[in-house]
Amino acid sequence: MEILKLEELDDLAFKQALTRPAIMQSTKVMQIVKDIIEDIKNNGDVALKKYSKELDKFDGDNIKVSEEQIQKACDNLDPKLKKAIDNAYKNIKHFHKAQKRKKITVKTAKGIICEQHSHAIEAVGLYVPGGSAPLVSTALMLAVPAKIARCEQIILCSPPPINDAILYAASKAGIKDIYNLGGAQAIAAMAYGTQTVPKVLKIFGPGNQYVTMAKRLVSDDNLGAAIDMPAGPSEVLVIADKHAKASYIASDLLSQAEHGNDSQVILLSDSLSLIEQVNEQLNSQLAALPRKEIATVALSHSRAILCKDLALCCKISNEYAPEHLILHVTNAKKLLPNLKNAGSIFVGAYTPESLGDYASGTNHTLPTYGYAKTASALGLDDFKRRYTVQYASKAGLKALSKTVETLADAESLFAHKNAVSIRTKD
């Protein structure tokens, strides 16, 4: 991993050091995805089955997974893996149940009562990637809050053949409608509906460049579906001092680097000696990784930056706004007030990012690519929508009428004014 000294970087070099790898959203990818979406919108199941066979290599008769297939997968799963999924499920459910909101009722003025209510989004679609790394944990991270929110209809799509562990995790969370569907065709089917796949109102979950592009396109269409958040390659930023353990830091950096060629990892430290030790550990640990080729590419556009102090490290982290932020410093909690922009923060040497990815209870669906400045980690609220309710008595309307009439006058919206005036004169 390249080592840079902040004091030697001009503004342009500093900007380049924190530049993320380009997301592949070429014109070619966009056109391919547009064609798939349009075909499925117009031809439904006929087009869906065509793409399922061509792209997913699915030769089965039924896109929907049967109850028998789900049960068989649950029965065949290694008990050790079942236990791990059960434990992760328990913690994720515990944390997300605590996010339930109460109805808010406020008397804002005499005779005026305002309330905030919420209800679950009626129909949601969950996308769980398969491919080289079947994301069992993602099935839990999406399904658990969807069930707690009490969405009426929840469907899950994953590329075939769906891993038994994904089927077990989805079943454990109470998801019954599961489909052998991957890629852009899965997103299109959920966004617009077909004869087999019901239309949903919002789509959740990560995916490759085709899935990401499909989510973007359907969310731009008022006939399509909303999406959870903007997506980009996975990333981690580590802040470390001279007392940190280099082997721990290297393992955290590699845990993100192995996600994909376009992943990025950043190390900020006030100790050159530590940075050099981390680089040595990266080389030794990398050699033992099955996905070392992927991690090696990710490390090629990753950086270690030497800063004069931890305060500057915090400032740079806020500017970068990482998906994951790990604090390998003495008394790590003391840095928290200075850190604002991160998807999720992992405090101390014994809190690796892997905990949050799998089993601590927090959600691992996080804003990437700098969106942590404005977007939040996935939570229960993402599966619900808020709305307001208000009540006014005669006395309340009368007391507030002059304020409303004056403001409506100022905006030249006379029908607004009249809606109040006609009542106060009655």
Image (cartoon, rainbow, N blue to C red):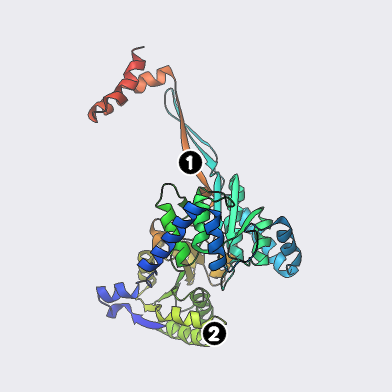
Is 264 placed above or below 88 here?
A: below
Q: Which residue is mark 1?
A: 386
Residue at 68% in and 57% down: 171
- How far apart are the two marked residues, 2 and 1, measured between alpha carbons? 47 Å
Image location (x, y in percent) of residue 259: 51, 73
Q: Nearer the viewer, residue 41 or 210?
A: 41
Q: Secondary structure at mark 1?
A: strand
Residue at 44% in and 56% down: 38
The N terminus lies in which quarter of the figure?
Answer: bottom left
Image location (x, y in percent) of residue 40: 49, 55
Image location (x, y in percent) of residue 393: 44, 20
Q: Secondary structure at mark 2?
A: helix
Q: Is residue 87 visible?
A: no
Q: Which residue is mark 2?
A: 285
Q: Nearer the viewer, residue 30 or 165?
A: 30
Is 26 placed above or below 68 here?
A: below
- Corner quadrant of residue 72: bottom right
Is 201 placed above or below 263 here?
A: above
Q: Is residue 258 visible?
A: yes
Q: Nearer the viewer, residue 1 or 223?
A: 223
Residue at 55% in and 50% down: 124
The C terminus lies in which quarter of the figure?
Answer: top left
Mark 2 touching mark 1, by CB under 8 A? Answer: no
